[in-house]
Amino acid sequence: MILGEVWQSLVWGAVARRIICGLTICYLVGPLIIVVILSFSAAQFLTFPPPAFSFHLYHNLLDDPRWGDSFVTSVTIMIPTALAATLAATAAAYGSMRLPPRVATFVSGLILAPIVVPAIITAAAVYGLFERLQLNGTLAGLILAHTVITLPYVFITVSASLKVLDPRLEAAARTLGAPLHTAFRRVVLPLIMPAVLSGVLFAMVVSFDELVVSLFISTPEVRPLTVQMWSDILGDVDPTIAAISTLLLGGALFAICGQHAVRRLLRARNRIDGVAQPL
Amino acid sequence: MLNRYDPAQNERTRLRGAALEIVGLTKRYGSVTAVERVDLSVAQGEFVTFLGPSGSGKTTTLMMVAGLQQPTSGQMFLNGTPLEPLPAHKRNIGVVFQQYALFPHMTVAQNVRFPLEMRRVPKHEADRRIDEVLRLVDLATHHRRLPTQLSGGQQQRVALARAVVFEPSLLLMDEPLGALDRKLREQMQTEIARLHKELDMTVLYVTHDQSEALTLSHRIAVFNHGRIEQIGTPAELYERPKTRFVASFLGDSCFLPGRVTRVSCEVAEIETAYGLLRGRNSGALDPGAAALLAVRPERITLSRHASGKADNNLAGTLQQIVYLGQSRKLVVRLGDGTVVSALAPITEGEGGFDPGDCVELAWSSRGCNVLTNDGEANDAE
């Protein structure tokens, strides 16, 4: 009898868990699905459910050069940002391991500041500084600002990976005759590569998605996609926004799947163990 | 004197053929002293083991020789060349790390090739040496395996191959067998002894396992609190320990406290709660000083009746008999409650003892040592 009751409660537990999971998924994914559906709507305004199926929003997207231009701007910012942030953050993560613990905490605090400080404050500060340096509205300014903002994400990812890397591996390389830089290139870097690549991807996503700081320092001439979307939705609620959102969602999905594939490939090739698998 | 190196001594060492000379090596972390004025001279081809509990400074000393840690003071010479100015990668010292530290993203052959690549050894020469060293460690068919595909013992052998393939002037091993189970450990001990012989290398070996130290070493340096407590051949350390720590860390000992009454250069006599006991003088004993008689359990014989033949006789009650396979441990309680263990081989047709029997413990003064009682508790076990 008691066994039966336990069994019953287990079954109910499993059912309840499934219901909660299901509801959570609906809550998180539901809005996305609605946007996807809306993007194929034939209506001139954002109405749900859509009256008919149509590609006209995607046609709008292609016809209006502002979307294409701002997309190119976003990518032009994103790629150098990701490279610079990954390079700097990897170097910083590797270097801060060698600092005395207190100094290391201070340094990582500085690097992580952009995700701790409210975005609006960062934005205002960057705007003020760039005003003096005359960087507002320039690509260089946007790349610089985005690099600072994405730095912490790469830093966290790479640091986590370095922390679980056996320090004896580098020591072993050195005793075998490798100078410090060779030991890094031949032993440390290959082993933290998955984290570094995740870092690149992370930096790209964060940069592409960044709105607040970009809003402050961009101009109509140099305007990333997020800012374009923002101003568009503020003006008249153009349903084209649903189409661009759907494309971005597709892009994000592609990136996540791509990252998984790269990881599996690397792991199958190297059977890397002792290395963190952040993300 | 700490930072001074005596050239005359250097000359003496060179004549003796010392491969490694360590003088006054000290390492401090803030106010903590990890290694304190370690002096050591290792001859070419010698196998020297650092034995001690964890935190006794043995690994730190090794890492300073390897160049992975910087000494606070002191000097090191490898074949007469000062080591301190050389960075780790220029010292030409092979190191086998705890848990092997094989590069997980490289195959066995790539791991072994690494030091040769760093030395720009031509490819065909490198191939030849890799084949040779892998054959030496019995892994001739494992070139293309990844470290994760090997067993612990095999990984250990790859680490060894990688550390010797570039013919280092000195081989350091930091608890290389710590991660293996007992059976494999004994097997690897034999293997290491064989390799040492075949390669004729000078080896510094760190372990906290006394049987490993006794099996492998020409000489053992017992570390305690960052200092070398005693250094000597395994037999010297076992038979003639100079301190309580050495007597208890290397093998088992029973300690009976007392005061020195008479000292000659060979024998010392101490007055204890159980009467006068005699043992070998470990040096530095003064009449009247607190002392300890250290006796190995296997040196004590038990009998039913007082014979009075031996130099040292004690009466007690047999408390417990522990069967150990090769021998029996006989636990005897003395009059004041002190417990002494004797180790007796198991022989056939022996009448034996029963717990509760009144017995006599006897041992020769040549089989035990009188040590100064520095009051230090036994922190070995």
Image (spheres, grey):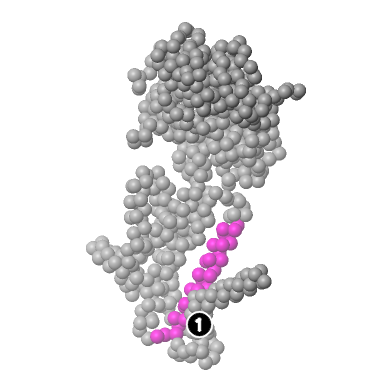
Residue at position x 43%, y 29% in the image: B225
In depth, the one of A243 and B92 nearer the eye is B92
Left or right, B372 with respect to B142, comes to: left
Q: Chain of mark 1?
A: A
Please tell me whether residue A251 belongs to the stretch shown in magenta.
yes
Please tell me whether residue A47 belongs to the stretch shown in magenta.
no
Where is residue A106? Give x, y as percent: 33, 51
Snapshot quadrant of residue B181: top right
Residue range corresponding to the magenta coloring: A237-265
Q: Residues within 10 Å of mark 1 (few under 14, many from 20)?
A: some
Asked if residue B142 can be seen in this view, the reply is yes
Q: Quadrant of the N terminus of chain B?
A: top left
Left or right, B69 with respect to B199, comes to: left
In depth, the one of A129 and B376 nearer the eye is B376
Q: Which residue is mark 1?
A: A34
Label 1 amino acid?
A: Ile
Q: Is residue A138 above or below residue B172?
A: below
Q: Main secondary structure of the magenta part?
A: helix
